[in-house]
Every structure is written in structure tokens, then in C-alpha cells.
Amino acid sequence: MTKPFSAIPSAPGHWLLGSLPQIKKQPFHLYAYDLASRFDGLVRFRLMHKPVLLVANPVTVQTILKARPDTYRRARKTESVFREMSVHGVFSAERADWLRQRQLMNPAFRPGQIREFFPIIQRCTEALCRNLAARPGGNPVQTALMACTADITSVLAFGIDLNTLDRSDHEFQRHLNSLFPMLMYRLHAPFPYWKLFRLRRDRELTESLQYVRRSVAAMIEQARAELAEKSAADRSYRPENLLEAMLTTRAENGQRFTEDELFANVLTLLLAGEDTTANTLAWTIHFLADQGDLQDQVHAEIEANYPRGRPLGYTDLDRFPLTFACARESMRLVPVAPYLLLEAYRDQVVEGYRLPAGVMVMVLLAASGLQELAFRDADRFMPQRWLSLSDGDQKRFASELMPFGYGPRLCPGRQLSFVEMKVALIELLRRFRFRRTAGHEVTESMAFTVVPTNLRVDIDQR
Ligand code: HEM
């Protein structure tokens, strides 16, 4: 028999504020991890008067994520906040609207297309290496990584190299950087105060949105004109960036992206593609910086397998299992997008309890990665563990840890980010040795993705 929602174990909280005081003291995801481990993966808590169901058991998580787009959707607030900020694209769209946009976007992420992007990824990674070599001591490496993935993503998204690696004052990027934290802030705000009154940060947001909107509109215009020219000159011309791919693709029903959707999806790609990959790399370097011996092993693997007399090629990337295991291990310890906020369209049953429609469901994507039951020495950075797994364990972990989500809405950019991360780690660890700069305590904070705050490393050339 189905038990009522009120029978789900409940986290202790303030009578009026619920869990807000605890969440103020630490990042939301760390609070959620702690609750999930204390309450066996299923617990409810309150954000003021609003109940939230926290779900962490992988099988339940998968059942919920697979039941999209018809049974579950992203929490309604996602759509309204994304809409207000003109980023209502594939990430926040639902049902038929989502399906059409996803069909339009998928071709831009086909392996063949990613292969075509390889030279761009290489060029930006070279610029990253030059940038880091020029600033060896106490380097804010995370800023450089963000600039690198921003440059890669902007060339891939609309064919323009912003070159923020060399130009930290780039106006477009400055405005973009102010959009994303606000998006996160509004998504988690207990109530939408900005609909009643505007603080300085809300006025600045409007200004940044106007700037970005104008710039992206001009980029779309330019891409459309160039595409027409190139296709007229060469009838077999293939799209060179995601915007061109989105301009040329039609959904199964023959529709194309509307102007607003194009704008929203270009921004969605910048949003989804930059911080996630950059911060995964930043965490990897953070963990490696404490382990000189491991860096030497990785360096030996790279030296042994790096091609002689020619640059690294796309097909070489699988020759560096230990190097890539460092990124996998970092994603296990700190999945940078640790949770999704969803809700059901109609009442559902979750682990035998009734879940009323519309109640927020916080789904943890990779909580078992931190559990001793699943991983020996779960809190230690041990990339070697990924090399000696049996086939069964490989499969089990691949399905239990879902750093890219799961089901029909699985991240379309995961292969692209693997390629970016592989190239970056191979080139960085081949040339440099990272050491943690003394006196800099790194903490986790949540700013759309999980960020290593205060990360500073000393860099020695090999
Ligand atoms: C380490 C890198 C990345 C991580 C950890 C990551 C993680 C995620 C997660 C957890 C989701 C939600 C999936 C779900 O709802 O089941 C997602 C969605 C998405 N990601 Fe990524 N992502 C990464 C890189 C990228 C890149 C490089 C791009 C593109 C340039 C990208 C584009 C997207 C898009 C468009 C969505 C929305 C998909 C949809 O709702 O249908 N991501 N990503």
C-alpha cells in the first residue's frame, strides 16, 4: 500500500524557515549530501513552507530521470527564471517544445561534428598553456581554465574567438559572467522579490542582458549571412559551428528554431558548456596538485604515448587512460552539477510513498560516488581505481554515477567536454607540474556549478 508523503522521514528544521538556516551556512549540495547519507537516500525537508523531496538512490534517480519529458519536468521555477532572462532554450523547455529543440540541437553534437571542432580545441588549449607559462607562481588557474573553455565554447557556439584568455577585460564575457550567477541566485531565491522591487544587482542584470542580447543578435545575423554565402559557393558545405548547425537543421516536423530560441540556445550553450568543463578541470588540477608522484606517473603515460613529430590528433586521445581517469575520479569526488530540481506533473509513487504533483524533487546525481560502500577509500583521489575495475563494476559505476544526468535529457555536450578535458589534461600535464600554493585553503562553493574557491597553484615547467 502506498504510504502518504508525510510518512517520509523528515529533516529537522526551523518551524518557519525550514532548512534555510542550515543552507545559509554551507552550499546547498553539501547540505543535501549530508541529509542523503543520514536518511538513507530518501528524505523530505522544507524551504520555508515549501516541501522538497530529496532523492539519492541511483535506481530511484534513474526511474525519475527516465520518466521525462511526460511524467517529470524541471521545477517550474526554472522555466520562469530562464524565460525572464531570455535563456529559455533546450535546458528549460518541456515536453513537445523540448523535444523539438533537442532534435534541432543534437546534430551539432554528433561525433563527426565534434571531430571537426578538434583544431579549435587544440588552438585554445595552446593559448591556455602559453597563458599559464607566463604566470607561474600562485596562479589563479581556475580563471585561466574558465577563459579557455569560454573561448572554445564561443568559437564552437557561434564561430567567434572571443580570446578572453588574452583579453580578461572582454566586455561580452564580463556581461556574460554577471548573468550566470544571477540565474543561479534567482533559481534558489525563496521568493521572486525582483518582481516587486529591483536591487542594484537586478538593474545591472538588465543592463548585461541588453548588451548580451544585442551582441548575440549581431552574431546570429552575421552567421546567417556567412552561411548563405558559403552554401551558395559550395553546395556540400557542412556547418562549422553550433549556430550554423542550428540554423540549418530542421526538426522532424520541419520546423526550425525561432529567433528567440536561437538566442536562448546560444546562451544556453555558453552557460552549460563553460563553467562545467572548466571547473571539472580545475578540481582535477586541485586534486593532482597534492600528489606529485601521481603527476609523474601521468606525465610518463603522456610521454610514452604522445605522437612523435606531429601534434596530438583526435584519434590519439584514447591512448591516455590514466590521464583521463584523473578527470573521472575528479567527477566522482566533485560532480560539478550535483543535482537537478524537478517536479511531477501528476501524483507519483516514489519508493512506496505518494509524491504529490508539483512538489519539488531534488535529485542527487552522483551521491553514491562518495560512499564507502560503493568505493573503497571513497574520500581519496585515486584515479588508478578506474583502471582496474572489472567489466561489471565499470558498468555499475557508469550507471550509478550520473555527472551528466540520465535518460532522454542526458547532457548533449558530454562527448565534447570529454574531448576538451582530455586535450587540456594531456597538454597541461605534459608541460607543467602543479603544486598547491601554501596558505590557500580551497573550499567548495556553488555558483551554477561547484567551484573550487581560492584555488591557487604554483606551476613548474617540465
Ligand atoms: C563536465 C562538463 C559537463 C557536465 C558535468 C554537464 C552536466 C550536465 C547535466 C547534469 C545536465 C542535466 C541533464 C539532465 O537533465 O538529465 C546537462 C544538460 C545539458 N548540458 Fe551539460 N554538462 C557538461 C558539459 C556540457 C557542454 C560542453 C555543453 C555544450 C557546449 C553542455 C550542454 C548541455 C545542454 C544543452 C543541456 C540541456 C539538455 C536538455 O535539457 O535536454 N554541457 N549537463
Image: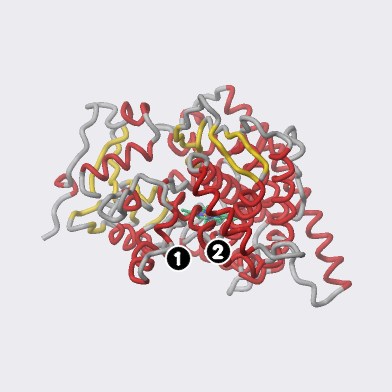
Given residues 454 and 320, the one toward you in this image is 320
Quadrant in the rendering for residue 140: top right
Q: Is residue 207 left or right of residue 287?
A: right
Residue furthest out toward the left: 1
How far apart marks 2 and 1 lie (CA) works out to 10 Å
Residue 383, percent across and down? 44, 54
Given residues 124 and 306, the one toward you in this image is 306
Tell me which numbered mark, 2 or 1, is placed earlier along the sequence.
2
Q: Is ligand 1 less than 8 Å from the beta carbon at label 1? A: yes
Q: Secondary structure at mark 1?
A: helix
Q: Which residue is mark 2?
A: 102
Identify the amino acid type marked 2.
Arg
Q: Residue at x 63, y 28 (%)?
A: 204
Q: Is ligand 1 less than 8 Å from the beta carbon at label 2? A: yes
Q: Residue at x 43, y 63 (%)?
A: 387
Instruction: Report the disc number at residue 408.
Output: 1
* Quadrant placement of the C terminus: top right
Q: Is residue 282 above or below residue 120?
A: above
Instruction: Report the disc number at residue 460.
Output: none
Q: Residue at x 56, y 62 (%)?
A: 320
Residue 331, percent across and down? 45, 51
| Crowdedness near tag 1: few (<14), some (14–19) or many (≥20) residues, C-alpha within 10 Å | some
